[in-house]
Amino acid sequence: MNLPRLYAIVDVSCFAAPLRTTAAIVDYARELAAGGATFIQYRNKVGTTREMLGHARELRLALGDGVTLIMNDRADICIAAGFEGVHVGQDDLSPEGARTVIGPSRVLGISTHNLEQLKEADAGPADYIAYGPVFPTSGKRNPDPVVGLEGIRAARAATKKPLVAIGGITRANARSVIDAGADSVAVISDLLSSPTKVAAEFLRVLV
């Protein structure tokens, strides 16, 4: 598969609780798409299944066919909401289990944090592999050790699958990550302010 350079992540935990509404989340995703983001993951580690499904269905309706939507963790909600794929972590449903749920045609991604995990993912059914954190990040409460640009170079040498770099990536360092061998950069925090403008700036940097 050909991944776009920018992999935008809508992380519900970045929205203050009173503002964690379906409308706010959909509007944010629309702004990302207006800036040129065509590959968007919906990530919700704090909500109920009902909330996740509600958000996911509204995102699908709002964004239409021009955006590939990836569900974090939940293969069942991916199917129910009509998303194009699912992304699983090391503590979630196994890639094999996720593939069984979503079938052969949907996109399957997996997070990895060291070369052992990456090589295991490379041998499995995932369509792309995320690797990181590349730089220090606030996206997780207990982040894995930083891999740095050298880690991305090593990951690139270890897999021919599309490689998504994640963790602490900003407009200032994104080009260096691509130059180190990543096919795409996953971004949460640096998109939060002025998402349309910032998404467009990322895409200009990553041409």
Image: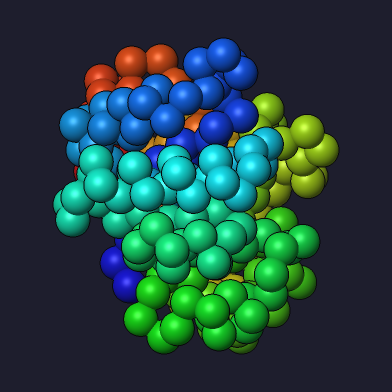
For this view, does 149 lie left or right of residue 195?
right
For this view, does 197 lie left or right of residue 109?
left
Residue 11 percent location from the top left of the image: 53, 35
Q: Residue furthest front?
A: 50
Residue 165 percent location from the top left of the image: 52, 50
Q: Quadrant of the C terminus?
A: top left
Residue 176 percent location from the top left of the image: 45, 40
- The one nearer the camera, 127 or 82, is 82
- The one nearer the camera, 195 or 19, is 19
Applied colour scheme: rainbow
Residue 203 percent location from the top left of the image: 26, 37
For this view, does 124 lie left or right of residue 187?
right
Residue 192 in view here: yes
Instruction: Answer with the quarter of the image where residue 26 lies.
Output: top left
Instruction: Answer with the quarter of the image where residue 44 lies.
Output: top right
| In the image, residue 15 above or below residue 131 | above
| In the image, residue 7 above or below residue 98 | above
Q: Quadrant of the N terminus?
A: bottom left
Instruction: Answer with the quarter of the image where residue 103 lies.
Output: bottom left
Which residue is depicted at the point 39% across and 74% down? 106
| In the image, residue 105 above or below residue 62 | below
Which residue is depicted at the point 65% across and 54% down? 151
Which residue is depicted at the point 48% across and 71% down? 108
Which residue is depicted at the point 58% across and 60% down? 74
